[in-house]
Image: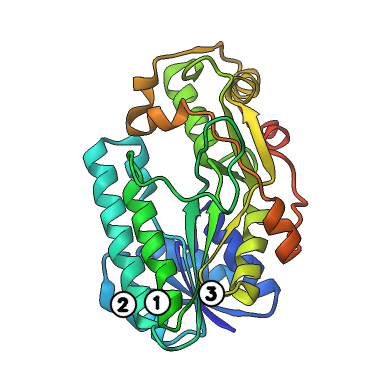
Amino acid sequence: MHVFVTGGTGTIGSAVVAELLDAGHTVLGLARTDRSVQALTAAGADVLRGGLADLDVLRKGAAAADGVISLAFDHGSETSDAAALDRSIAEEAAATDALGQALVASGRPMVVVSGTPWVPGRASTEDDPLPMEGPVAGRARSVTALLALADRGVRTSAVRIPRTAHDEGKGGFAGLLTDQARRTGVAGYPGDGDQRWPAVHARDAAVLFRLALEQAPAGTVWHAVADEGDAVRDIAAVIGRRLGLPVRAVPTEDFGPFGPIFAMDQPASSAHTRAALGWEPAHPSLLEDLELLEP
């Protein structure tokens, strides 16, 4: 299968590109910068120059492919202000719609990235809807609209990534905690630290994206969850020990627009995904991977 991939140089995206190529697929990767061109070329992918806002380029990439995996998102907005986050979400929504519309009536697959939802008092499952309120509700709406294209001849599916997708101790919410610790000199966590975050190794997530591309029925949702939920205090403790920094609670506001989400208890399950697609994580857990952090 010739697969058009956006966001193919990020923590998850680079793992997805490698997984697809290793499985015998070919990849056309969207590249906005020279650095991205070099990374994709080195990995063995073909390159289409353009950014997430270049909708005609996205349509061209989708039209030339047997399937699409959409991963691109401006993650710099996650540590910026709420307005920047809103702009990134709107850009992603327009891009997702353009890609999906280009595949209407084709029967071809499109896999989009999403996040695991949170459900009070228990681990969320694949049957739980995404929240339509809160700082990232716009992402939920765009994913929901994409999945609805199953009724218009697109084999759509969504892979829900937990709060931390990691590789060598970097990436996701845990990565943001690490970055904040380096800046402030404190391995801080919001709330009482008992809240749980699910996690997955990026290379395990990449396998699930490939399986969804190859096998997932139209309109389906999957959970790329390896660790159902690690206490944030435990995550911060490893970060603090590895960086030689004190560990303590800090105000939720210190984490910007994602602070309220950081403070939530949000474990998630992947039992259905494992049973239905045969997905089985094989790489280190988050707490194990964080041991690779360097001071």
Rendered image: mark on residue 218: 3
Q: Mark 2 points at which residue?
A: 57
Rendered image: mark on residue 48: 1
Q: Which of marks 2 and 1 is nearer the N terminus?
A: 1
Decide: is 65 above or below 290.
below
Decide: is 195 above or below 123.
above
For label 3, the crowd category at 10 Å Cα-Cα, with few meaning under 14, some 14 to 19 and many 20 or more, is many
Q: Does the image show residue 68?
A: yes
Q: Earlier in the sequence, mark 3 or mark 1?
A: 1
**Residue type highlighted by circle 1:** Leu
Question: Residue 238, image x and y in percent?
Answer: 65, 23
Of helix, strand and loop, which one carries label 3?
loop
Where, by quadrant of the figure, is residue 77 drawn? top left
Q: Which of marks 3 and 2 is nearer the N terminus?
A: 2
Mark 3 and mark 1: span between their CA atoms? 27 Å
**Residue type highlighted by circle 3:** Ala
- The quadrant of the rendering that contains the C terminus is top right
Q: Which residue is drawn at 48% across and 24% down?
A: 182
According to the image, what is the colour scheme of the structure? Answer: rainbow
**Residue type highlighted by circle 2:** Val
**Residue nearer the viewer, 271 or 7:** 271
**Residue nearer the viewer, 75 or 49:** 75
- The quadrant of the rendering that contains the N terminus is bottom right
Question: Residue 16, image x and y in percent?
Answer: 59, 64
For label 1, the crowd category at 10 Å Cα-Cα, with few meaning under 14, some 14 to 19 and many 20 or more, is many
**Residue nearer the viewer, 4 or 232:** 232
Q: Which residue is drawn at 55% across and 18% down?
A: 193
Q: Do the residues labelled 3 and 1 touch (CB within 8 Å)?
A: no
